[in-house]
């Protein structure tokens, strides 16, 4: 059974290091690519770093591997890409695994259900303003590899995306190393420019409707970035949801913080697909 693992910011495919082997051992044909501009992938030839552009790359990846359909798991930006992919190409996505509280943008439906809008936290999300509105200035200020790496490491530390001491120095050195490159850091800010509207889209986002595929939703409880009313929002955004389930002691980076739990959850959620695939394989 094909399984696609999608990273977000401030990660690369390295965040899935503790998931690839164990999930492959359970029977998945598993791939964790670097998104365009991240890690070891090429930069965008057309300058686009929006959901449609990412998913054009991923559909090409499906076709290269001969995948008709796949289970798609993602967190952060990767979760939003997965949601867009499920709505843009529903025939290619069997199920979703969402590893945070990312959801389609259904403001009207949420309001009709009496769910209040999310409250902005300026002191927490100052990086959104800086990366979305002042990306070039910020990159110019971070003018050495060490400064760039230290800036990215802050998202695993004092910004409270995860519990204190969830990552040791060796973890941080490994996970943040790709961002020593100035162009890589600049490319990663493009997503925030898309979010705040300072970068054009290659195509409209497909986030204006509920996701119809079955979706497993896991949310790390110990992170300042989570929104309120996740259960109510999830029921509308993912009508076939399993969850959300809250993982205490985990934050925004569950694939690394709680890999065994994530691996078991994905395997259990997709066990019937794996069994069907095994039964259908030629002997």
Image: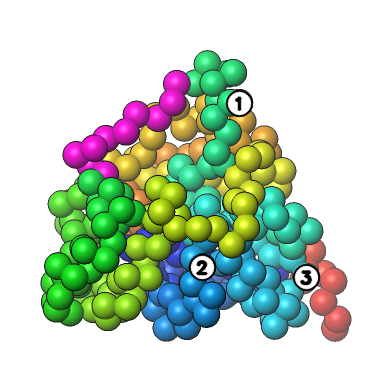
Q: Which of 16 and 9 is in front in this view?
A: 9
**Inter-mark Cα distance, 2 to 1:** 30 Å
**Discs 2, 1 touching: Cβ within 8 Å:** no
* Residue assigned mark 3: 68
| Residue 272 rendering spot, x and y as whole percentages | 73, 57
Residue at (30% x, 71% y) in the render = 185
Who's the residue at 59% across and 18% down the image?
112
- Residue 36 is at least partly visible in this image: no
- Residue 7 drawn in magenta: no
Q: Give the range drawn in magenta.
A: 116-125
Image: 107 above or below 130 = above
Asked if residue 125 is positioned above or below residue 24 in the image, the reply reads: above
Quarter of the N terminus within the rendering:
bottom right
Q: Of helix, strand and loop, which one carries label 2?
A: loop
As drawn, is 120 to the left or to the right of 169?
right
What residue is rendered at 52% in x and 52% in y? Answer: 80
Q: Mark 1 points at which residue?
A: 109
Q: Which of marks 1 and 3 is in front?
A: 1
* Res. 102 in view: yes
Secondary structure beneath disc 1? Answer: helix
């Amino acid at each position: 059974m094909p399984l696609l693992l999608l990273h977000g910011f401030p990660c690369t495919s390295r965040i899935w290091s503790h998931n690839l082997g164990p999930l492959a051992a359970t029977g998945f044909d598993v791939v964790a690519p670097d998104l365009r501009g991240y890690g070891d992938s090429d930069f965008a030839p057309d300058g686009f770093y929006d959901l449609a552009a990412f998913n054009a790359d991923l559909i090409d990846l499906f076709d290269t591997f001969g995948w008709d359909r796949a289970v798609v798991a993602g967190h952060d930006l990767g979760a939003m890409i997965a949601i867009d992919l499920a709505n843009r190409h529903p025939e290619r996505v069997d199920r979703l695994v969402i590893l945070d509280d990312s959801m389609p943008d259904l403001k009207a439906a949420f309001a009709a259900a009496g769910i209040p809008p999310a409250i902005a936290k300026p002191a927490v999300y100052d990086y959104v303003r800086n990366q979305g509105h002042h990306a070039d200035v910020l990159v110019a200020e971070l003018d050495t590899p060490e400064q760039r790496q230290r800036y990215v490491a802050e998202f695993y530390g004092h910004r409270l995306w995860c519990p204190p001491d969830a990552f040791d120095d060796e973890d941080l050195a490994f996970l943040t190393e790709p961002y020593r490159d100035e162009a890589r850091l600049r490319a990663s800010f493009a997503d925030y420019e898309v979010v705040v509207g300072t970068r054009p889209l290659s195509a409209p986002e497909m986030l204006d409707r509920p996701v119809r595929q079955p979706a497993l939703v896991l949310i790390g409880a110990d992170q300042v970035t989570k929104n309120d009313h996740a259960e109510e929002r999830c029921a509308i955004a993912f009508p076939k949801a399993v969850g959300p389930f809250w993982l205490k002691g985990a934050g925004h980076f569950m694939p690394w913080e709680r890999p065994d739990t994530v691996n078991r959850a994905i395997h259990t959620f997709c066990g019937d697909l794996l069994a069907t695939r095994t039964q259908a394989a030629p002997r």
